[in-house]
Image (cartoon, helix red, strand yellow):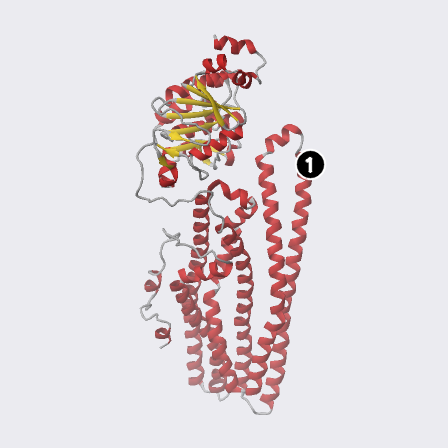
Amino acid sequence: MLIGCFGLQRLRNVNDVMRLLKPLPQADPGEPDARSAVHYLLWLLRKQWRSLLVAGFFGTTWMACIGALPGAIGQGIDDGIAPRDTGGLILWSSVIVGLAIAMAGLGTIRHRMAVYNFLNGAYRTVQVATRHATRVGAILPRRIATGEVVSVGSADPTAIGMALDVIGRTIGSVVTFIAVAIILLNISPLLGTIILIGLPLQALIIGPLLKPLQNREHAYREEQGKLTSRANDIVAGLRVLRGIGGEELFTTRYAEKSREVREFGFRVAAASAVMKGLQMLLPGVLLVAVTWVGARLTAAGTISTGELVAVFGYTAFLMMPMGTFLETARKYTSAYAAARRIVTMLQVEPSVSDTADPHATVERIDRLLDPQSGLAPTPRKLTALACTDTADATAIIDRLARYVDSDASADGTPLARIPLLNLRQLVLVSDNDAYFFAGRLRDQLDPRGSGEDARLLRAVETAVASDAVDSVGGLDGDLDAEARNVSGGQRQRLRLVRALLADAPNLYLIEPTSAVDAHTESLIAQRLREYRTGLTTVVVTTSPLMLEQADEVCFIDDGKVKATGTHRELIASDMDYYALVTRDSAEPEIVEEVAT
């Protein structure tokens, strides 16, 4: 009947249960309800209701076996030990052994379901957060601190998973608490009343501590996120800090912030310690009271010795569901704080909207046009953008690659009408902030895994990056996160290798040679032209060595295309262009020679 009530008639053995466990992580985590933290948690409960229901069933039956032990022991005393009845003693001893065996089996499945629910909730949270971060793109760190993003990807999924882990035991605690309460009232209304008033009273005393604990945990996590952001910034700029002698200053600042976080941690620990202390003290006081009253009732003959033992056991057992209730409250307090951060991230909207018909794809893009600046790079040529302000070039490329909404078009079609994924496959932008993950160099340079060494080595040769590859032990060597185990110039050339291997029909390179010496830059410029033959390539640069190799140069001043021509033509005809490309040169005779 109980199985029928829970709608689990088919769960006749462990294999039936295990069939409910889909491989994790699931292929589609679903679309989260990000209206609020509560809505997000309810969405998770809806997505996992089947496995949570199974966990509740086994949590209930497992706790029912534990709760039945005091009654079985009491009956064994009254029916076996007190009257010296061997048959009664054997019977109830067998019942106790049976309950222990059932408890072990049911506990195993309950624990497995709890772990499954934990992992399912944690993985689902990681999936939706990662998917959203990918969809939002580069705007995310501008809206949310790096530490908050790190927390969403590490600690917060664990907090969410722990809240789902405890649900099976929570359901079992509710059911068994009610059942044992009825049994206690039947044995002794006085003892039952003392216990049923005493246990909720404990919750009323401890409950008000949850809100301060929640506030302190939230403040602690915020400070922890700020500290993580600072650590990331320090690690990212470590080479620069060492170069300018700023290590000691930033170490001191980090230590000061770390001490502040430690103080917040102490506050959380203090509140948690008070709560745990009360969880030990209050049940002990109740147990003493029940023992004293029960002993007097037994002495008066109101209840039997076996019933006294059972009452004592039931009281001890009820500490278990009460502890589970408090554990549930603590875990949902932490889960709520985690869900708030997750929802904050999920509410960040991308800088561009993707409302185009997903079937309205284009196979190629010949000419991109930015009406705001007047730039329209010649198809299948190497075009250089020489800008008086690099920010203007970045803004233009953001519009042409549709990182922001604009009036830019592709072959007369507004970019807004082209599906974003389709556009990303046809137009690639590579700048000096492009990230490298830790891993094998081959995988970082060629994420698609073409596996062709000849192709990889050709791109490496084009970018003059052989020394960078050799420095990490070859293509199969390990690259650190952010490529911290190579120099700045090597890192820049590895970015260029990765961009070339993408074989994008339209490639935009922003200052790809700003960190290399003149000889290396000259080689890259010559080889880049050959490597990208027949493909549209746009390079943002003011280097004469790179400009000389371009098929056309667009001189951009104040965000507008002022002049177009070859490098030599512009050197001869436009003094502003001449001043731009020679202002950092200590050898003007070289430029004069180039122009002749």
Picture coordinates of residue 392 (x, y %)?
51, 30
Q: Residue at x 60, y 60 (%)?
A: 214
467 or 315: nearer the eye? 467
- 169 above or below 77? above
Looking at the rendered structure, the number of numbered marks drawn on it comes to: 1
The quarter of the picture where the N terminus appears is: bottom left
- Which residue corresponds to mark 1? 249
Query: What is the quadrant of residue 237 in the picture?
Result: top right
Query: What is the quadrant of residue 331 in the picture?
Result: bottom right
- 240 above or below 297? above
Asked whether the viewer can see residue 263, the reply is: yes
Residue at the outermost bottom position: 301
178 or 187: nearer the eye? 178
Label 1 Cα neighbours within 10 Å, binned few <14 / some 14-19 / many ≥20: few
| Apparent side of residue 128 relative to residue 193 in the rendered image (left or right) | left
Q: Residue at x 62, y 54 (%)?
A: 219
Give the amino acid type for the residue marked by disc 1 in the picture. Answer: Leu
